[in-house]
């Protein structure tokens, strides 16, 4: 056993379970109501507190840190192997304490309040985007039942419903027309809220130097930059870019049996990290690849056009040189006016050709 003195805390909505372990012995195991937690730890001597990184843990982490305690947060999936017997609050608190003293355990940084503010805006915006898509599909589906087919994309629907008088020309009853107008008003409200979220994120982006530097990377815009800056304000916690990819779950997993002689079997990406960040980065990379492919196609077409038109331009330059020589001869020779007119007509026809 490890020589340690830690307190494992299992948080909940109404009561907290506390487990203190010191020198391989259980020093304390008790339950406290939520309203007495702050007073209890305020009077306690400074110790190491271990909690799961779950709902409310970052708030308690900041509060306990201000009291002088050393607070550490652990991902819930890393606590599960240390749980003994059945799952309950007491066993969870014991498992948290045991996991906290495990060597090489990786802890979750405590988020500041501004980080939670920005990430909350992202969560709200993500929900609104889903509601907007759901509502657009609902309106399109209802109108299709009346023979009105609206193309995909939100702009097509908005332009179609911008003027309520357009519905009057369709074969729709007044009752259904009122319902469609109400749905359109609801869609406008959701769009307004999304725009407000974008303005709040843009304000943070202008004030955050880290977010502005991240946005300079190809394929990363305002939304992705602010999400990364708020989720990981201190990149020094990662040794390299691959470790950051592991944190996001973008690297392939692997399995191996049979010792050192056997080769590991590579699997798909683990998807163990923040799925919201992973989604934004994957979408940005796919958009970048599509843009690059389009640029490559344009460049290839330009090269083909250049090769096709090269003989024509070469022929044109040769014709210009020939015309210059003819004009010079005509000027030097003392030809009659009638002959000069015929030569000029012939040159104009040649130029037109």
Image: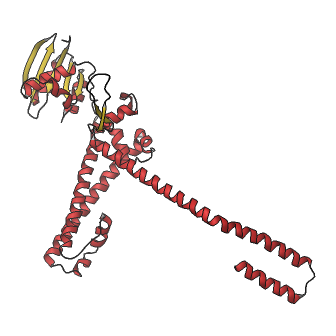
Residue at the farthest bottom position:
338
Q: Answer above or below: position of 26 versus 313.
A: above
- Vertical comparison of 294 with 19: above or below: below
* Residue 244, horizontal then vertical, whole percent: 35, 34
Name the image quarter holding the C terminus. bottom right
Q: Position of residue 218 (x, y in %)?
A: 45, 46
Q: Residue at x 22, y 57 (%)?
A: 131
Across and down, in percent, residue 212 comes to: 43, 43
Quarter where residue 314 is shown: bottom right
Q: Is residue 234 visible?
A: no
Query: Is residue 324 in sight in this rendering?
Result: yes
The residue sitting at 9% across, 24% down in the picture is 91
Say whether residue 233 is left or right of residue 305: left
Foreground pick, 107 / 141: 141
In depth, the one of 150 and 253 nearer the eye is 253
- Residue placed at 15% from the left, 78% from the top? 174
Q: Quarter of the image containing the N terminus?
A: top left
């Amino acid at each position: 056993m490890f020589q340690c003195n830690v307190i494992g805390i299992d948080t909940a909505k109404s009561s907290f379970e506390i487990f203190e372990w010191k020198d391989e012995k259980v020093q304390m195991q008790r339950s406290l109501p939520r309203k007495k937690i702050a007073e209890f730890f305020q009077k306690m001597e400074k110790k190491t507190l271990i909690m799961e990184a779950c709902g409310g843990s970052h708030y308690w982490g900041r509060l306990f840190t201000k009291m002088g305690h050393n607070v550490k947060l652990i991902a819930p999936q890393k606590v599960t192997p240390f749980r003994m017997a059945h799952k309950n609050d007491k066993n969870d608190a014991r498992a948290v304490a045991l996991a906290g003293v495990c060597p090489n355990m990786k802890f979750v940084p405590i988020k500041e309040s501004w980080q939670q503010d920005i990430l909350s805006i992202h969560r709200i915006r993500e929900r609104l985007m889903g509601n907007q898509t759901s509502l657009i599909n609902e309106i399109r589906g209802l109108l299709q039942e009346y023979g009105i087919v609206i193309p995909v994309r939100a702009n097509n629907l908005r332009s179609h419903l911008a003027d309520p008088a357009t519905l009057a020309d369709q074969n729709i009853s007044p009752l259904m027309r009122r319902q469609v107008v109400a749905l359109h008003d609801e869609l406008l409200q959701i769009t307004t809220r999304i725009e407000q979220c974008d303005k709040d994120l843009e304000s943070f982006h202008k004030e955050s130097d880290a977010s502005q530097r991240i946005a300079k990377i190809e394929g990363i815009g305002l939304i992705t930059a602010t999400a990364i800056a708020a989720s990981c304000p201190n990149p020094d916690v990662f040794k390299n870019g691959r470790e950051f990819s592991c944190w996001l779950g973008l690297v392939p997993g692997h399995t191996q049996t049979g010792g050192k002689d056997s080769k590991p079997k590579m699997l798909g990406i683990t998807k163990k990290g923040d799925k919201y960040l992973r989604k934004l980065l994957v979408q940005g990379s796919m958009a970048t690849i599509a843009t690059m492919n389009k640029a490559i196609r344009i460049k290839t077409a330009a090269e083909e056009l250049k090769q096709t038109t090269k003989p024509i331009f070469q022929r044109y330059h040769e014709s210009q040189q020939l015309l210059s020589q003819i004009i010079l001869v005509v000027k030097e020779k003392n030809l009659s006016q009638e002959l000069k007119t015929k030569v000029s007509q012939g040159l104009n026809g040649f130029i037109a050709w």
